[in-house]
Amino acid sequence: SVSEKDLAAALSWAVSLLRDSGITTPLPDTELLAAHTLGESRGRVSALKIAGFQFSDAQADTFEDLVSERAQRIPLQHLTGKAPFRYLELEVGPGAFVPRPETESVAGLAIDYLKDAPAGSKVVDLGTGSGAIAASIAHEVPHADVTAVELSPHAFAWAERNLSPLGVRLLAGDFGTALEDEEASFAVVISNPPYIPTGAVPQDEEVRLHDPEMALYGGSEDGLKFPRIVMQRAAFLLEDDGFFVMEHAEVQAAAVAKILAGTGLWRDIQTHQDLTGRDRATS
Ligand code: SAM
Ligand code: GLN
């Protein structure tokens, strides 16, 4: 084998390769791939590096392959098979949208609301993908009764792995018609629907090449066809004074507030900012 065995040297090779490939987070990605290779934590990798650790031949080859794949812009989370989301680590892979940090804040809005809600309060996550939102609510609000809906069979398989240990009800189906028998029974409806405008090209190759198209595109030039369907479904599913929250793009905030106001059901419409101060969710 010709792969670099000295951990410190292998790490610096990897950081340069990833940086040259246009990846903006070469150091954390490198350390996380080394951690994955060794079955250790990222912190332990730093300690091993300082101690002059040497990879075995097999480890050196595995690490080199993982870094080369990452340089081809395969998402880090597909290579490690894991995505952190709030307090959980979700299983992810090809076929499921990789959960995003901004969605953690959106889930947090529902979680805050539910802390004071009665036991058994019903919650539904429309378009659950890997199950990220539904899983974190079930984990952090054990007294809630959580349902998740997903149409893509590929995403559904990942959601099943993440949600069944948490006792979340997972339904295969369209968020426009789901839960027909459960009108006005949900305390919370939450969604991160597809909302990228048709024809827009996502900047990151990881997104463009590896996130499923049906997770990304909103179905119309303003990207709001599917979000509008989700808002209509929320109006059908929510009980009086229930809580609805949906993620969207920054430029869509005003249009989303207007659509919600138009239903006449929401009295107190609020726009919420992500960690960088952008208007990325509305309740
Ligand atoms: N909620 C997950 C998250 O935040 O990581 C996934 C969000 S992804 C942006 C949107 C999800 O909606 C995808 O999993 C996609 O397959 C699903 N989806 C798209 N159209 C749908 C439909 N008509 N009915 C149900 N789910 C749908
Ligand atoms: N935030 C995602 C992205 O930038 C878009 C996800 C969505 O449409 N819900 O790729």
Image (cartoon, helix red, strand yellow):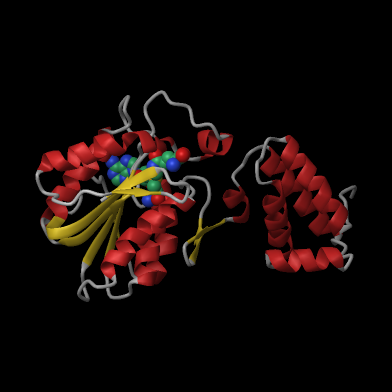
Residue 163 is left or right of residue 90, and the answer is left
Which residue is rendered at x = 43% and y = 35% of the image?
Answer: 213
**Location of residue 216 by image quarter:** top left
The residue at the far front in this view is 277
Total number of numbered labels? 0
Which residue is rendered at x = 90% and y = 47% of the image?
Answer: 2
Residue 77 is left or right of residue 241, and the answer is right
Q: Whole-percent x and y of residue 153?
A: 38, 47
**Location of residue 220 by image quarter:** top left
Relative depth, front residue between 218 and 175: 218
Which residue is rendered at x = 69% and y = 42% of the image?
Answer: 69
Q: Whole-percent x and y of residue 46?
A: 77, 64
Figure check: 48 above or below 177: below
Relative depth, front residue between 267 and 135: 267
Query: Ligand 2 is found in which quarter of the picture?
Result: top left
Residue 193 is left or right of residue 72, and the answer is left
Q: Can residue 262 be seen in this view?
A: yes
Which residue is rendered at x = 47% and y = 63% of the image?
Answer: 86
Q: Whole-percent x and y of residue 49?
A: 83, 63
Q: Is residue 39 visible?
A: no
Figure check: 120 above or below 176: below
Q: Whole-percent x and y of residue 15?
A: 77, 46
Relative depth, front residue between 65 and 256: 256
Residue 165 is left or right of residue 148, and the answer is right
